[in-house]
Image (spheres, rainbow, N blue to C red):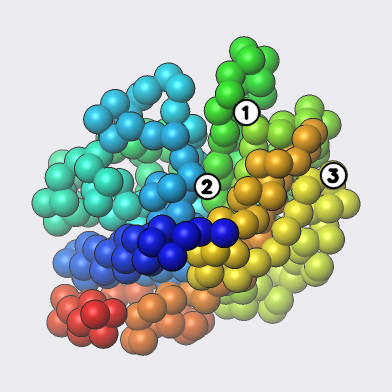
Amino acid sequence: MLTPAEHTRLAEFAKEIRKKTLYTIGNLGVGHIGGALSIVEVLALLYGKVMKIDPNNPRWEDRDFFILSKGHAGPALYATLALKGYFPLSELDTLNRGGTNLPSHCDHLLTKGIDVTTGSLGQGLSIGCGLAYALLHDGKQQYVYVVIGDGESQEGQIWEAAMFAAHYKLRNMIVFTDYNKLQLDGRIDDVMSLGDLAEKWRSFGWHTQQVDGHDLNAIHEAVINAQNRQTRPAMIILDTIKGKGAAFCEGLESNHNMSFTMETANRAIAELG
């Protein structure tokens, strides 16, 4: 359980990530706002408390690794990294513009703090498996954290990686599913239902939990439980709301990638306080 002071600090960090994400996409005028806003709390917890990182040395060999497999949510990660000091906040003004270091999808070669290039859905989890396997082979005490999408979980490669991680007992891997129940073409259950997602991951041999993805205490407790397991990779399914925290897009089926003005963004930012 987070202390009251920790919870206050992380809640404020989450609010600032949400504000900067709204600003960054609003400044451009279009972007993947829904799936960016739904992962804010897990980013705040990982970068604000859980992970071993050094913003002054992004390639620190002993760091924990983070992979945003659903790479289209990059603006939320960029906001997080900027607020942590990996690069100046002013760089957020350049999102997806010519010459930017902040492309629409995460790029390891361009952005400080990005460990893996992502955007082609399904691949991030496999890369994470390779990293986790190598770290265990070398006797390293580091974790690999991965965020995947629920729509992404319709990709066959996700389940190949799930088998690999369970077979090789990748106990240093903790994966989160952003289970916001929506994807580009509509509702998950209408496009291709995932069934009982938690039971599916359990059947693949993973230590599996399902929590409120906007509850910092619940996510933190799940991470601690995952770290305390002995021999298995861990899946934490985050029940989230796509577009969380912005009234103009929260829960809309059309919020995967949408256009909105800076005026709309500023209004949402003001509503956050």
For marks 3 and 2, give the CA distance.
21 Å
Give residue 113's position: percent from left, percent from top: 33, 36
Callout 2 crowding tier (Cα within 10 Å): few <14, some 14–19, many ≥20 = many
What SS does tag 3 mark?
A: loop
Q: Secondary structure at mark 1?
A: helix
Q: Nearer the viewer, residue 162 or 214?
A: 214
Give how far apart the Cα atoms at labels 2 and 1 are: 15 Å
Image point 50% across, 64% down: which residue? 216
Q: Is residue 132 above or below residue 91?
A: above
Residue at (57%, 33%) from the top-left corner? 143
In terms of sequence position, does the residue under pointer 2 or pointer 1 come before the other? 2
| Helix, strand or loop status at disc 2 | loop
Instruction: Please give the residue where the numbered disc 2 appears in the rendered image.
Output: 69
Which amino acid is tagged 1? Ala
Residues packed near mark 3 inside 10 Å, few (<14), some (14 to 19) or many (20 plus) = some
> Which residue was labeled with disc 1?
132
Image height of 225 relative to 8, above or below: above
Quadrant into which the N terminus falls: bottom right
Residue 205 circle label = 3
**Rendered-image quadrant of the C terminus:** bottom left
Observer able to see residue 102 = no
Measuring from the top left, give residue 221's x and y in whole percent. Answer: 62, 57
Q: Position of residue 46 (x, y in %)?
A: 46, 49
